[in-house]
Amino acid sequence: MPEVVIPIGPHHPALKEPVNFRVIADGEKIVRLELDLSYNHRGIEKAAEQRNFIRVLPLLERVCGICSHSHATVFAKGIEEIMGLEIPPRARYIRTIIAELERMHSHLLWLGVAAHEIGFNTLFMWTWRDREAVQDTLEEMSGNRVHYGMNEIGGVRRDLTPAQIQTALARLPDLEERIKKYVEMVNSEETLLIRFRGVGRMSREEALKYGAVGPTARASGVDYDVRRDDPYLAYAEVPWNVITDNHGDVYGRTRVRIGELWESIQIVRFCLENMPAGPIRVEAPKNAPDGEILSRYEAPRGELAHYIRTNGTDKVERVDIRSPTLANWTSVAMCLVNQNLADIPVIVAAIDPCLSCTSRMVVVTQKNGTRVTDTMQVGFVRDPKGRQSRVSL
Amino acid sequence: MTDPVFILLNIFVFPGFFFLFAYALFLSYLDRKIAARMQQRVGPPFYQPLADLIKMLGKEVINPDGVDWRIFDAIPLVALAAVMTAFLYVPVIGASPLAFQGDLVLVLYLMALPTIGLFLLGWLSRNIFSTIGGIRAVTQLFIYEVPFFLALLSPAIMAGSWSISEIVLWQQHNLWLVFLQPIGFVVALIGLQAKLERTPFDIPEAETEIVAGPWTELTGRRLALMHLTTEISLVTGSALIAALFLGGPLLPWNLSPPWLNVAAGFGLFLAKTLAVLLILSSITVATGRLRIDQLNDIGWKYIASAALVQVGIVLVINYLWVVP
């Protein structure tokens, strides 16, 4: 059968946000693909340079709807380090609780989306229903379901009352039950197994070579988690485990995320039960001294990095956001080659892509006098022995 | 029985087209409602399938560039006509008045027509998603059709008749075929699920992969008619399985006033088709979508072998136990 070009995106039912894959397929097999990012330039980094530290946090929180707390925390953490501020323990614990609740709702959402991509809508409906319990807890604590607005430079804006802590703790056993159920489903549900196992496989070497981060890398056996390897907030004081898996495929990524759900519940419970007393913020100076920092954070999707440079004013001189999805794109493009056309949605979904967080820059090149967006062309060939080589297109 | 008015009533009103429309929409509603309740959703109100149908019938029909619109108009009509005709030969309140030797084969062929129509639609759409969907539809047809035919023909071998109504009659005097041919029953249910392109066999119209497959370029009344075709296929298929394996609408004994017999038969028909629908809905809810290559493996390795084994068992039973 001759090769056909199948455009997946920028508008496609499998994609919730715009990205374009030009998939060149031979029948149902993918031969190579071209990836075109950046349909959604929002100018957030530039806008961040115009606002002072009080006004910039709500802006950065809106980089992403799912990991909103991640972006605000990683920025606040960086600025506090430049200012030399030590935030109170209670603030650290509250930030940790919100961060882990956010991871829980993100992973539950992901599990539903992955199930939907293979047409398993029941799991999709169930996980999204259970996610509501997490969302309710977040709403009770912060007043919001999506953008919590908990952070400020020097601490958090809202304290948790004993009543809030009690209701949050009361919700956890039910969630534990449900997560046990999902572990059972993922390990025994036949259609999930045959659609997830061996699909989009990536070895440990490949994960390291292409710079995969987060659950995608941990599913390939890369034992790396910023929360443990560069501890921030309360993670050094909380007992928890980094989840890794050796399957390296979509199945492994699912197992890692479900394992992390379980760990998140334990972290939230520990923090709620061992919440230190005291103030929730310290007074932060208006201006930050000259400095630059690479602030790192384990967002639900992987390592999130904000590069921040300050120049003695109340604004940043430059903030550069490297979202985890950007780090995972190369690996997803690599995983897709030689796979089935039908597996594109689930392999792409397996990195939990967050496209609008990633697209902040359009690279325009001049080609025969016409302006075209820069296309990431990836062509990989696997020889019969499974070795891989990159081909130029 | 031979009164032309009676025949016309039978074709157009009951248990023919009018009843078929109503029951198809009702089953479609039940299917959606059952799935919704299992997924902890509320589900649609009972008039939703009718509302959808009317709305879609009134929508604009868009002709893709360079596509022969006559064929595009004709395919949904032909597909709908095929499955509606097929229903006439399936017993609803008693033997079908149109029954003849070989109507089982006719029904099976008529029920295969919508899939061929979908393939043509996909092929003619000049849209990459439709084309892939069309190819998948016809690939899937080749996979499930053989075991489905084998599973539905083994009742005919056992009853020694090619007429659905006579197979039902045979079951009235003997035993329901589901007890004699359990493997065939399971294969027939799987085949029907695949024929109706419901999860896990919704490969040709996999939304997250190829948008809507062959349905992508269908709009307005074409889409409405194609949806109606699927809904009517569901009724015809369930009724066919109820007739061939579950004894159809006939009671094992006769009730005293004849009208009571007919009413009981109709009640049995409803109960049995609803039972088949419940099984099909449960399969839909409990599974994700297979991949076409995986279906190829499973279909030929296991489902087709199971159907062949069933035919073999039927031949052995027939040899040992000469049917009266």
Image (cartoon, coloured by chain):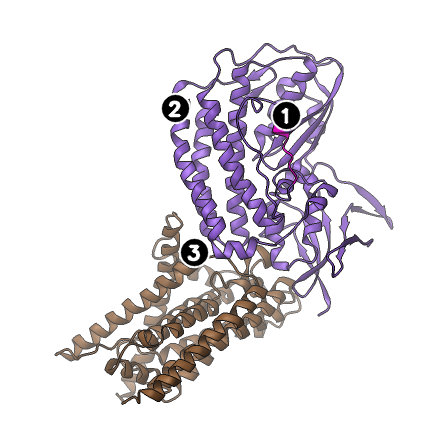
Chain colours: A purple, B brown
A245 vs A80: above or below? below
- Furthest residue toward right: A368
Residue annotated with mark 1: A74
Say what amino acid the circle numbered 2 marks: Gln
User: Magenta segment range?
Assistant: A222-228
Magenta region includes residue A225: yes
**Residue, disc 3:** B286
Give the class, few, some or many, for how many residues have Cα within 10 Å of label 3's Cα (few <14, many ≥20).
some
Assign the N terminus of chain A to one quadrant of the image: bottom right
Residue A179 falls in image quadrant: top left
Residue B44 percent coordinates (x, y):
38, 53
Question: Please, is residue B131 above or below residue A344 in the view?
Answer: below
Residue drawn where x is 30% and y is 69% of the image: B272
Give the residue displayed 54% in from the left and 34% down from the top.
A103
Give the residue drawn at x 61%, y 23%. A232
- Chain letter of the residue beneath label 3 in the structure image: B
Q: Is residue B29 above or below residue A277?
A: below
Task: Check if residue B115 falls in the magenta segment.
Answer: no
Disc 1 chain ID: A
Q: Are marks 3 and 2 on the same chain?
A: no
Residue B28: quadrant of the picture: bottom left
- For mark 1, give the secondary structure: helix
Q: Could you tell me residue A260's position as x and y percent?
A: 53, 37
Residue that label 2 marks: A166
> Badge 1: how crowded within 10 Å, few (<14), some, or many (20+)?
many
In the image, A233 versus A326, the foreground residue is A233
Q: CA distance from mark 2 to mark 1?
A: 28 Å
